[in-house]
DNA sequence: CCGGATCCGAATCGATACTG
DNA sequence: CAGTATCGATTCGGATCCGG
């Protein structure tokens, strides 16, 4: 009853009624990284009005997409239901599609830990990836990015405390990579790793610059054939 | 500058800013069937206010998703750009996802030729499909559905004249199938073809009832594993 | 008929403040 | 921490109108 109906009996329409409202899919995006508390979501979506976050969570619960789970250690988290988790390939595909249209960031655009985590998942190519273990900084966000046996693992380091259930990987990364928004040119294959360094899109603060070859191979989004 | 920004530098966010406004993805759904005129779109989306249709088309053009093409035979059509057409797997996946949540139709819900066409594409399994040629009626909508060599072809018959570029298949269909909304239970595999007939979800008006076996095999959506 | 543009009331959204 | 309340700013929906 939350969403005004489109008046059509159709799967796409039903889907859009469930997750098509403003902010809804971004909430799902963040929950795909892991369960989150109300406050975590609010921080990860800095511009969302709190009443809207509240409404969306209620609607997503009514739609069977999200579940509210009390924690034994006080507090509660929101997490995706299996049905909600089934959106993962769709959100990843949307991320790849939208990636093509990303220009330079507008003033005030931020990068959040969850959005960057999903961006990495979005561009990850299991079949091309060799093992890799780096610390990646973009803006304020710091992630530990580990590829092992064609599997991607991302842990959030700096801004807040590690999220619930997030286990910090032991050991030291092979390298520390510091990047800005221009890193998308590396992922898009517009520039080689060497060019990316030369143009200051990316810097390797510690470790060998050759690590970027492995990075660019593991994380890549092909342009849409015209 | 149409869409209010979410303030994040992220592919998913960019995608949602391009196609996340109300009605936008349904316009894309219809355009995935083929180029459409303004009036076609308005008919296929009976509840869309005309000013909204107008705004969305403008925004989709600005976003590089839709193109406005004047026809030599007078008039003009909207069609997807290659970038817009790249949404096809996403829209199909969303249709499959939303299908799981479809209950019975609400009062006033309609089925349109384009939505039914996309619903068939959504549920089509090329690897399982044997050749098939039927006329399918759901509500007022009549389609000619042809499977040949694991390829699906759908032509719209009754309500309006065949759409631009739509070629009516020659010859007679093997069968005429008349269904209601309950056909989704057949596609979901909740019922066998025989049960679907017994429960009056589907009727074979002409031809052999066994044709439904081929139909159910070609068009199927697996439930999401819980 | 086609392809919209305009106007206006209703519903939603955004920003801020406030509470258990 | 996890929301609710309030209120002005936008957007949406429905109807009408207009030029070709």
Image (cartoon, coloured by chain):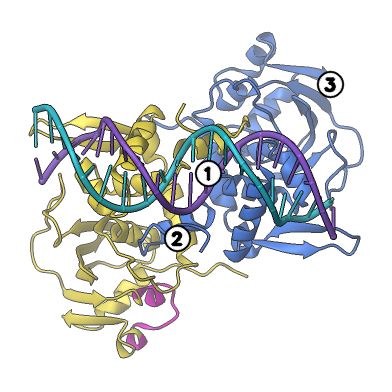
Chain colours: A blue, B yellow, C purple, D cyan
The answer to whether A166 is drawn above or below residue A137 in the figure is: below
- Considering depth in this image, is B139 or A193 the residue closer to the camera? B139
Please state, as top left, top right, bottom left or bottom right, where the C terminus of chain B lies in the image.
bottom right
Q: Position of residue A108 (x, y in %)?
A: 66, 24
Q: Residue furthest top?
A: A198
Q: Chain of mark 3?
A: A
First-in-chain label (1 vs 2):
2
Q: Position of residue A50 (x, y in %)?
A: 69, 46
Q: Secondary structure at mark 2?
A: helix
Q: Secondary structure at mark 1?
A: helix
**Label 1, label 3: how far apart the Cα atoms are:** 32 Å
Q: Are labels 1 and 3 on one chain?
A: yes
- The residue singled out by tag 2 in the image is A14
Q: Is residue B180 left or right of residue A17?
A: left
**Residue A145: within the magenta?**
no
The answer to whether B213 is drawn above or below residue A147 in the figure is: below
Q: Position of residue B125 (x, y in %)?
A: 39, 62
What are the residue bounds of the magenta stretch? B183-195
Estimate how packed mark 1 is, as few (under 14), some (14 to 19) or many (20 or more) residues with alpha carbons within 10 Å.
many
Q: Position of residue A122 (x, y in %)?
A: 60, 40
- The residue singled out by tag 1 in the image is A93
Q: Chain of mark 1?
A: A
- The residue singled out by tag 3 in the image is A207
């Amino acid at each position: 009853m939350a969403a005004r109906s489109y008046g059509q009996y159709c799967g796409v329409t039903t889907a859009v009624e469930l997750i098509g409202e403003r902010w809804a899919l971004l909430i799902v995006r963040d929950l795909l990284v892991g369960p989150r508390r109300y406050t975590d979501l609010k921080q990860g979506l800095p511009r969302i009005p709190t009443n809207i976050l509240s409404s969306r969570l209620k609607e997503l619960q009514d739609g069977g997409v999200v579940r509210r789970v009390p924690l034994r250690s006080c507090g509660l988290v929101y997490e995706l239901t299996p049905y909600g988790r089934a959106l993962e390939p769709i959100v990843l595909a949307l991320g790849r599609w939208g990636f093509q249209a990303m220009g330079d960031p507008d003033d005030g655009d931020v990068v959040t830990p969850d959005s960057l985590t999903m961006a990495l998942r979005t561009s990850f190519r299991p079949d091309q990836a060799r093992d890799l273990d780096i610390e990646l900084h973009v803006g304020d966000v710091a992630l530990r990015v580990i590829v092992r046996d064609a599997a991607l693992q991302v842990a959030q380091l700096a801004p807040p405390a590690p999220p619930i259930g997030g286990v910090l990987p032991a050991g030291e990364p092979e390298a520390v990579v510091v990047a800005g928004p221009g890193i998308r040119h590396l992922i898009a294959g517009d520039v080689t790793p060497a060019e990316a360094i030369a143009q200051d899109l990316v810097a390797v603060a510690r470790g060998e610059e050759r690590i970027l070859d492995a990075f660019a191979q593991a994380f890549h989004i092909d342009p849409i054939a015209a």
